[in-house]
Image (cartoon, grey):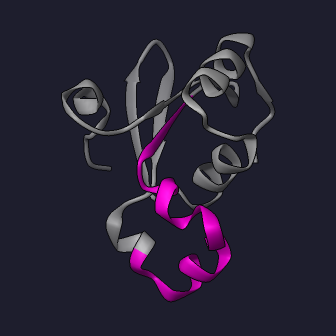
Amino acid sequence: MFEAMTHHAEARANQRGIPYSLVEAVLDHADIEVPVGDGCTVYRISKERLNDRDTRRQLGNLLDRAGKVAVICSDDGAVVTVMHDWGCQGRRYRGRA
């Protein structure tokens, strides 16, 4: 669970069609945490975690989308932005924990 979403994060989530429930799901199940600068960290769910039976059951209908979303949070716990994690555009955020 996170403290708050910035106005920027809300706008980007809306523009990119990423619902609040998906942001929560990614943060609840994320097993990849990579510092990306300015005190921010990107959170993602690995393919291994998505293949876990308990995770699959908990994510339910969000399973297909959860592995394709990256959530960037500041060090105070606020969600700074959300983005789709595919193609070369998400390359910066693909690091391993």
User: Residue 56: image x %, image y %?
Assistant: 55, 78
The residue closer to the viewer here, 7 or 11, is 11
Image coordinates of residue 30 in percent, x first then y, are 52, 55
Q: Nearer the viewer, residue 11 or 70?
A: 11
Q: Residue at x 44, y 71 (%)?
A: 50
The image shows residue 91 at horizontal and vertical percentages of: 22, 31
Q: Residue at x 26, y 24 (%)?
A: 89
Q: In the image, residue 51 lies at what x, y percent?
A: 40, 79
In the displayed structure, 18 sits above or below 65; it is: above
Residue 59 falls left or right of residue 5: left
The kind of secondary structure the magenta stretch mainly shows is: helix
Where is residue 52, by image quadrant?
bottom left
The residue at 57%/61% (across/down) is: 29
Kindly identify the residue that appears in the image at 61 percent across and 37 percent down: 18
User: Looking at the rendering, which quadrant does residue 55 occupy?
Assistant: bottom right
Height in image: 20 above or below 10?
A: below
**Picture quarter containing residue 85?**
top left
**Above or below — where is 82 with respect to 19?**
above
- Note whether residue 18 is visible: yes
Per the rendered image, the range of residues in magenta is 51-72
**Residue 75 in view:** no
Relative to 84, 96 lies left or right: left
63 to the left or right of 61: left
Farthest bottom residue?
Answer: 53
Q: What is the number of callouts on the image? A: 0
Instruction: Judge whether 50 appears above or below 93 on screen.
Output: below
Which residue ends up furthest to the left in the rendered image? 88
Would you say residue 15 sits in the magenta stretch?
Answer: no
